[in-house]
Image (spheres, rainbow, N blue to C red):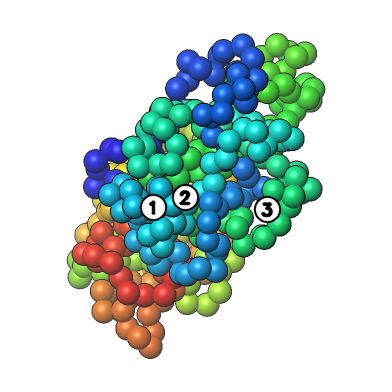
Amino acid sequence: MLKTLLASLPLSRFEIDRDHSTRDLPGLFETLWADEKTRILPFWNGQALLASGDASDGDWSAAPARDSASARAAASAGGAADGHPALAFLPPSRLTDVELRVYLGLSLAVDAPEALGSRLVAVSLSDDVARALEPDESRWVNLRTAASSLSDRDAGAFTEALGIMNWHRSHTHCPRCGAATVIEKGGWVRRCPVQDIEIFPRTDPAIIVGIVDADDRILLGSNALWENNRYSLLAGFVEPGESLEAATIREVFEESGVRIVDPEYLGSQPWPFPASLMCGFLARVDPATAQNALLPDGEEILDVRWFSRDDLTDPANAPLLPGSASIARSIIEHWYGGPIPAASW
């Protein structure tokens, strides 16, 4: 694992070597399916299958991220002996009828049920095959719900697989001529047979920023699509020809009317909903404009407010904060100084 300020971000954790050279092997998936040491992660409608337990077992979104040490006791029992969920990595003989296959890489987890160095594959299943494999829908879980409680191996595999599968769903045809594309290189390239061009996965960079004023309050906004009292950090996509820092300054002003200075990079987290990389910053209000009124854009952001630490924990008036899987929650708690005992969405 990388050790940075936000290294504990649930979706930034990983214990997989993506092993790019293996993607080029002829007959890759036939070779992998012939090896019973290969492990397959099933997906259905963007949800992964659990090894044991279900989504109603507890409040996963409020659970702390699971580290390697806490996972060891669970490995021999299928991954959930410590009360945490674990993903189901099945032998290839269990899954022969699949819609899409993506080679994820080599497992680096020393505490997982499979052997160190096992090759991992994610597969997408049809409705009929998924229901035959596991009819209990509570065993199929989404990443937002489970991320904080998964091991590093599972969180990384889930995030990697969901991101690449989302890309496949939106790139079935060539953007130049409209011809159906062919999947190659272990699921990491689509080739147009007419144009003879390779189409690679894309990630959309976005910024998200914690803004602090002279009174050490943090600025949060409420999106037009959210219910009342739901607030988060301001965020937005990076435009062509724009640096991350410039995007941070522009997006904050567009959404709130606030001018900021000296955005400090904190860390990044993949956000495969469907294909973003969230780049986190902390910034302060420009002293020259500190007295300017807050001006939400009225379209995307309907309300922006300054919150003190006491405001975020006020039992009667505290806002609903982002869930523990998000980089937004981590940045807010970085400013706060620790975990916030507040409701989340």
Residue 218: quarter of image: bottom left
Task: Say whether marks 2 and 1 touch (CB < 8 Å).
Answer: yes
The amino acid marked with disc number 2 is Gly
Residue 105 visible (yes or no)? yes
The amino acid marked with disc number 3 is Glu
> Disc 3 vs disc 2: which is toward the camera?
2
In the drawing, does residue 55 fall left or right of residue 184? left
Give above or below for 83 relative to 21.
Answer: below
Query: What residue appears at the point 30 percent right and 38 percent down from the top-left corner?
Result: 1
The amino acid marked with disc number 1 is Ala
Report x, y in % for residue 266: 28, 46
Return the residue at label 1.
74
Query: What residue appears at the point 41 percent right and 27 percent down from the top-left corner?
Result: 117
Return the residue at label 3.
134
Element class at badge 1: helix
Return the residue at label 2.
78
In the drawing, does residue 268 fall left or right of residue 102? left
Residue 11 visible (yes or no)? no
Along the polypeptide, which appears first: circle 3 or circle 2?
A: 2
Along the polypeptide, which appears first: circle 1 or circle 3?
A: 1
Query: What residue appears at the point 74 percent right and 50 percent down from the top-left corner?
Result: 132
Report x, y in % for residue 330: 33, 57
**Numbered circle sitting on residue 52:** none
Q: Nearer the viewer, residue 333 or 85?
A: 85
In the drawing, does residue 48 fall left or right of residue 243? right
Residue projecting furthest to the bottom:
316
Report x, y in % for residue 183: 68, 23
Query: What residue appears at the point 31 percent right and 53 percent down from the top-left corner?
Result: 70
